[in-house]
Image (cartoon, rainbow, N blue to C red):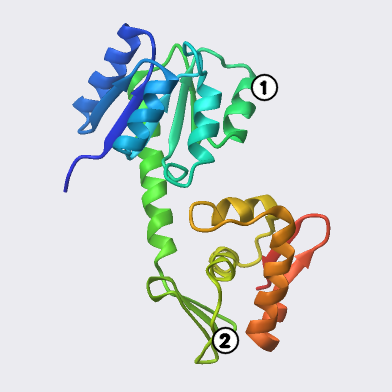
């Protein structure tokens, strides 16, 4: 199996060298970038398995880089670990809100950083495995690999967006998803807006028949698949 690749975005040469050295020592392939613009080019030309991203960069800062990557269907699924000297609570919240998967502050322990990278990659691998597992709940079966949905053994034809919404809800029954979370889950596969989510939910319920009652509205919050 090929080594997992990490794009390290850091404008301080000493820190860039330190991070790359410790990642390579632990079996990762690394590529370095010293600006946000260069990071975007590399992420598109050769998408890495993970990005370690500094926030304080010349030109485009790290938050904008993260926001740009997460809003692009071609790169939105690449996990991002922010590594920065900006350790105030507001900075951490801002980083996580634009889509970062973890946040490490400077000065940092190389061992801790590598452990965080490993944990994020492991979590992403589990999520991808879950995305391909067959789910059967309350008479509804969803088979992601074949893009099939069965209700009491009978095939139901769903649009791509309806399928993605149902899959998201059924993977975590009882969990309430906001409209924004539903949009994020569909991003990269199809185009869906906040207003359109309600329309897709109505259509999904209709196609599922009586089983569609399991797709519940939680007023003021979003939707869930009732356990």
Q: Is residue 1 above or below residue 176?
A: above
> Residue under circle 1?
90
Please report the residue visible at 48 percent of the width from the left and 36 percent of the height from the top: 69
Query: Mark 1 and mark 2 in contact (Cβ < 8 Å)?
Result: no
Determine which of the numbered discs, if any, sits on residue 139 in the image. Answer: 2
Return the residue nearer the eye: 195 or 102: 195
- In the image shown, does 149 or 160 lie closer to the viewer? 160
Residue 144: percent from the left, percent from the top? 43, 71
Give coordinates of residue 176: x percent, y percent: 69, 59
Q: Quadrant of residue 194?
A: bottom right
> Residue 57: which disc?
none
Which quarter of the figure has residue 99? top right
Label 1 SS: helix
Residue count near mark 1 (Cα–Cα under 10 Å), binned few <14, some 14–19, many ≥20: few
In-front residue for pair 22/8: 8
Q: In the orientation shown, which residue stands out farthest toward the left?
A: 1
> Residue 186 at x, y = what percent?
55, 57
Q: Relative to residue 222, is residue 32 drawn left or right?
A: left
Could you classify mark 2 by the number of other residues whose Cα lies within 10 Å: few (under 14), some (14-19), or many (20 or more)?
few
In the rendered image, the vertical position of residue 34 relative to residue 41, given as above or below: above
Q: Earlier in the sequence, mark 2 or mark 1?
A: 1
Q: How many marks?
A: 2
Q: Quadrant of the C terminus?
A: bottom right
Q: Quadrant of residue 20?
A: top left
Structural distance between the alpha carbons of marks 2 and 1: 45 Å
Residue at horizontal 49%, vertical 57%?
Answer: 189
Residue at the image point whose x is 52% and y is 68% from the top: 160
The extreme right residue here reads 219
Tell me if I can see residue 112 in this picture: no
Give the answer, above or below, for where 51 lies relative to 15.
below
Q: SS at mark 2?
A: loop
């Amino acid at each position: 199996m090929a080594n997992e690749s990490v794009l390290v975005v850091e404008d301080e040469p000493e820190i860039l060298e330190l991070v790359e050295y410790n990642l390579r020592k632990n079996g990762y392939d690394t590529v370095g970038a010293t600006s946000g613009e260069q990071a975007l080019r590399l992420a598109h030309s050769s998408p890495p398995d993970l990005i370690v991203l500094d926030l304080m960069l010349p030109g485009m800062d790290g938050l904008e880089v993260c926001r740009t990557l997460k809003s692009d269907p071609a790169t939105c699924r690449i996990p991002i670990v922010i590594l920065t000297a900006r350790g105030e609570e507001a900075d951490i919240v801002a980083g996580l809100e634009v889509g970062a998967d973890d946040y490490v502050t400077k000065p940092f322990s190389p061992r801790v950083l590598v452990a965080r990278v490993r944990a994020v990659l492991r979590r992403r691998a589990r999520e991808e495995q879950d995305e391909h597992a067959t789910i059967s709940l309350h008479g509804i079966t969803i088979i992601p690999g074949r893009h099939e949905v069965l209700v009491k053994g009978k095939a139901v034809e769903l649009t791509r967006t309806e399928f993605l919404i149902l899959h998201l809800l059924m993977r975590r029954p009882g969990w309430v998803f906001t409209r924004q979370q539903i949009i994020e889950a569909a991003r990269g596969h199809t185009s869906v807006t906040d207003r359109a989510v309600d329309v897709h939910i109505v259509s999904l319920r209709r196609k599922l028949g009586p089983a569609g009652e399991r797709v519940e509205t939680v007023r003021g919050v979003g939707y869930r698949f009732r356990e």
